[in-house]
Image (cartoon, coloured by chain):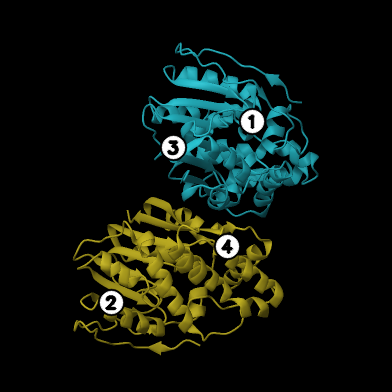
Chain colours: A yellow, B cyan
Amino acid sequence: MTTETTTRDTTRSGTQTAALTTARSGTPTTARTAARSGTQTDGPGYVHGYSTTEAQRLGDQANTLAELLHAGTAYRAGSRVLEAGCGVGAQTVHLLAASPGIHLTAADISADSLAQARARVAAHAPGAQVTWHHGDLHRLPFADGAFDHLFVCFVLEHLADPAAALAALRRVLRPGGTVTVIEGDHGSAFFHPESAAARATVDHLVRLQSGAGGDALIGRRLHPLLTEAGFADVTVRPRTVYADGSRPALVEGFTRRTFVAMVESVRSDALAAGLTTPDAFDRGIADLRRTAEEGGTFHYTFFKAVAVNP
Amino acid sequence: MTTETTTRDTTRSGTQTAALTTARSGTPTTARTAARSGTQTDGPGYVHGYSTTEAQRLGDQANTLAELLHAGTAYRAGSRVLEAGCGVGAQTVHLLAASPGIHLTAADISADSLAQARARVAAHAPGAQVTWHHGDLHRLPFADGAFDHLFVCFVLEHLADPAAALAALRRVLRPGGTVTVIEGDHGSAFFHPESAAARATVDHLVRLQSGAGGDALIGRRLHPLLTEAGFADVTVRPRTVYADGSRPALVEGFTRRTFVAMVESVRSDALAAGLTTPDAFDRGIADLRRTAEEGGTFHYTFFKAVAVNP
């Protein structure tokens, strides 16, 4: 399922941004590896994030949430920054917008995602200085302390051993450098009207991700994970999305097009895994959609952590 | 169970603050009425908040949370403000501290709570101008538009028909005046390590409150409730408590002494109602306590709403 690939390209800005290495995905030891190295299937190993419509969804999500998630993250021009697990570049473009002049290395284990990320950055940040790296974040080929800052967004949720991944990342961060980690937590979702069917449907997504070796409830674990990985001055803050009738753009952009769409995307996987029936799943989705209608409310919490390599 | 009472007193500041009316609690039509008009029992009708240790707990909670909940609430000196459901005065003292010079009327259906509130205000805000009113917030004797602002904190969760209560309160608010409502939502609680036993134990509290006619999940409903009650420009924002090892005072003040203590206080009621067994309940409490130890995290969301009487 995995392939040995050399990627080499030049961005539209004309900057030479050859991939730094020949990456070998190797044995899929993590959920992320499994998800990114294989084709989409209906099996329970599916982790959201790697289809064409998913790429669109993630782009929408990033735009809606950009300010919420990126506020407070701005690196000095000239800083060497690594985005570990850039995926399709949904966050990369916001990272570059907030920190002009940085030397960004964007790494991902999926060549397809990386190609999309390159195209997205070329379109949205044509002058940005980006080095694209195709490889596994557990085995980055960079020198110890090669970066001033690490940025890791919506990545740890897919990993079987996120503390080990963070420890591997810490090696390439200079002493005194910072890591920023952003993750969601599907257990933070609650809504009105309350619905057991909707709650069960969300739980299916959590179970599928767990079955694939990930953790959809990882947001609440960022503090202990970063501490375990050897970081210091670990500061975690919730970043909450709350949508009600007074915020129609958020209802549309987050509740409907991000959260409900994400849950809905695992329908066939949840059925294949025997977690639910078509009727029960669809009832849950209908109830989730109800929370985006008049009188409904929806709440979700992301967690943003910043820590220092001592 | 209810009594007709006239209260009359003078605060330490010397200001005459006779109760405005002879209040008759009448038939206990709401959970709050039921809870406040009766003695504490072990039956499922119990709603946390009305024992001596509970008063201490609520005072601790108010101090820990004062800044979180009261930030942004400051009324102009001379404003006529009604605190509907002041209870033991846990929020009253913070309200007065943030808004010196207001003419506060503090109302509650429990004479005992009101007496504690008076003592608390006398101790903490001796110069404050407070009128104490013993009565039911559904049938306040004040003139239409008598107040510039209403403040309602941790009250609606106990009411069988919170929209009706808000509509009754709106009558005594002048056009253009504001209402501020603060409520928790026990469904917002999540924690690490995750624990089904802990979650079940929290759910018992939710069910007991529901059985008593209240709603421990009311925070998420503030927007539709205020809208239904006829208020305009309804703005609701989450106010999140997130505690981890980097915030020991919050872990102690909120996770342990507020949330876990609150859940623990319904032990006998949960057992009497047949919701759980001693072992299962205690396991849930132990798991909740674990979230306050090293590597644990705890998350809870309050909701604060501000709206205008059109």
Residue receiving disc 4: A291
The residue at 42%/81% (across/down) is A110
Which of the chains bears the disc numbered 2? A
Indicate the secondary structure of the residue bearing disc 3: helix
Would you place residue A12 above or below residue A250 in this image? Answer: below
Q: Which residue is mark 3?
A: B70
* Nearer to us in this view, B140 or A65: B140
**In the image, which is nearer the foreground, mark 4 or mark 2?**
4
How far apart are labels 1 and 2 at the CA level?
60 Å
Disc 1 designates what residue?
B136
Q: Please report, as a chain letter, where disc 3 is located.
A: B
Q: Is residue B124 visible?
A: yes
Label 3 and label 2: CA atoms lie apart by: 42 Å
Residue B238 visible? The answer is no
Check chain identity for marks 1 and 4: say if they share one.
no
Badge 1 and badge 2 in a common chain? no
Determine the CA span between mark 4 and mark 2: 33 Å
Badges 3 and 2, same chain: no
Circle 2 sits in a helix, a strand or a loop, which is it?
Answer: helix
Residue beneath the point at 52% across and 41% down: B182
* Residue plotted at (26% across, 68% down): A97
Across and down, in percent, residue B296 comes to 53, 49
